[in-house]
Structure formats: structure tokens, C-alpha cells
Image (cartoon, rainbow, N blue to C red):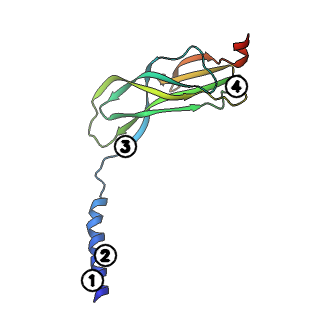
């Protein structure tokens, strides 16, 4: 009888929790959103230092919610003398809404962990690019800054 009670309790628990597993129809995907302005970008960079960069991004619709940014080193374009770093603002887009209202509102955020590597070889400059969208041909467009890296020998000269 004890086995039947345990089995019945387990079955009741499973059936009760299965109602919580229903999909409520809210679905999301992530996509880049345009960066429109950069502020507080340094004139030179120093190896081992971490920089803060303020930027403005555009929220296209009320279905978009800003979730942060992503930065990466473009290994195909980087070499020993130039390091290419790309940043993009990211939004989570809700797909379950019947319609999305156009906003095109601008908001601000901060990249607070742009660290310049002090590992050899130290490049002579960083090309920092911020994704602004795509052109008519579907090619990515960027705001691009070339920033020289201050090296130790620069200080002694």
C-alpha cells in the first residue's frame, strides 16, 4: 500500500508540474542594433590599461530591448602591427507581439572593459570599429577610429 501511495504522490506531482511547462508563446531572438555616436574615446592607448567608452545606440521598435554589447578581435584583419576590434550593441527582440511600434529612440550605454593587451607583439595601433548597420547591398557599416598605441620606447624618446 505504501508503494501505491508513493507512486500516486509522484504521479500527482508530475501532472501538477507539467502545467508549468506549457509554452506561453513569448519568443525572443538577439540581433545587433545600430551604434550612432561614440564619446570619450582616448587619443592614444597604453598596453595593459583598461578604458571606458560611452556610446549611443538606436532602439528601432518597442519589440527591441537593449541587452548589452559584444566586442571581439577580428583575427582576419589583425596582424602584428594593427589590432582590429569590433563592437556591436545587442538587443533582444520579442517575436510574440502582434505588431511592433517604430521608435528609433536613442539611448546611451558604456563599454567599461576595453582592455589593451600587453602581450607581445604589441601592435602600433588599434582600429576600433562600431557597427552602425548595413548598407543597401547588405554590407556592414562601421564608425571607425584608428588609435595609436603608446609603447615604452615612445616614452624614452
Q: Secondary structure at mark 2?
A: helix
Left/right of residue 6 with respect to residue 49 in the rendered view: left
- The Cα atoms of the two marked residues, 2 and 1, are separated by 8 Å
Q: Nearer the viewer, mark 4 or mark 3?
A: 4
Give whichever of 123, 130 is nearer the camera. 123
In the picture of the structure, the residue carrying the numbered disc 4 is 122
In the picture of the structure, the residue carrying the numbered disc 1 is 5
Quarter of the figure with the N terminus: bottom left
Q: Position of residue 13 (x, y in %)?
A: 28, 71
In the picture of the structure, the residue carrying the numbered disc 2 is 10
Can residue 134 be seen? no
In the picture of the structure, the residue carrying the numbered disc 3 is 28
Q: Nearer the viewer, mark 3 or mark 1?
A: 1
Query: Do the numbered discs 3 and 1 sit on residues whose CB atoms are within 8 Å?
Result: no
Of label 2 and label 4, which has the lower sequence position? 2
Q: Quadrant of residue 28?
A: top left
Considering every residue shown, the one lying at the far top of the view is: 157
Amino acid at each position: 500500500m505504501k508503494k501505491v501511495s508513493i507512486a500516486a504522490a509522484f504521479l500527482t506531482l508530475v501532472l501538477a508540474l507539467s502545467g508549468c511547462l506549457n509554452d506561453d508563446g513569448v519568443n525572443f531572438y538577439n540581433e545587433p542594433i545600430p551604434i550612432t555616436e561614440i564619446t570619450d574615446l582616448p587619443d592614444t592607448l597604453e598596453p595593459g590599461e583598461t578604458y571606458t567608452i560611452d556610446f549611443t545606440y538606436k532602439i528601432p521598435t518597442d519589440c527591441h530591448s537593449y541587452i548589452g554589447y559584444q566586442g571581439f578581435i577580428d583575427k582576419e584583419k589583425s596582424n602584428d602591427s594593427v589590432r582590429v576590434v569590433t563592437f556591436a550593441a545587442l538587443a533582444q527582440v520579442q517575436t510574440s507581439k502582434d505588431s511592433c511600434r517604430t521608435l528609433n529612440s536613442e539611448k546611451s550605454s558604456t563599454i567599461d572593459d576595453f582592455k589593451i593587451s600587453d602581450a607581445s607583439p604589441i601592435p602600433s595601433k588599434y582600429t576600433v570599429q562600431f557597427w552602425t548597420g548595413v548598407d543597401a547591398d547588405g554590407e556592414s557599416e562601421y564608425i571607425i577610429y584608428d588609435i595609436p598605441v603608446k609603447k615604452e620606447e615612445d616614452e624614452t624618446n
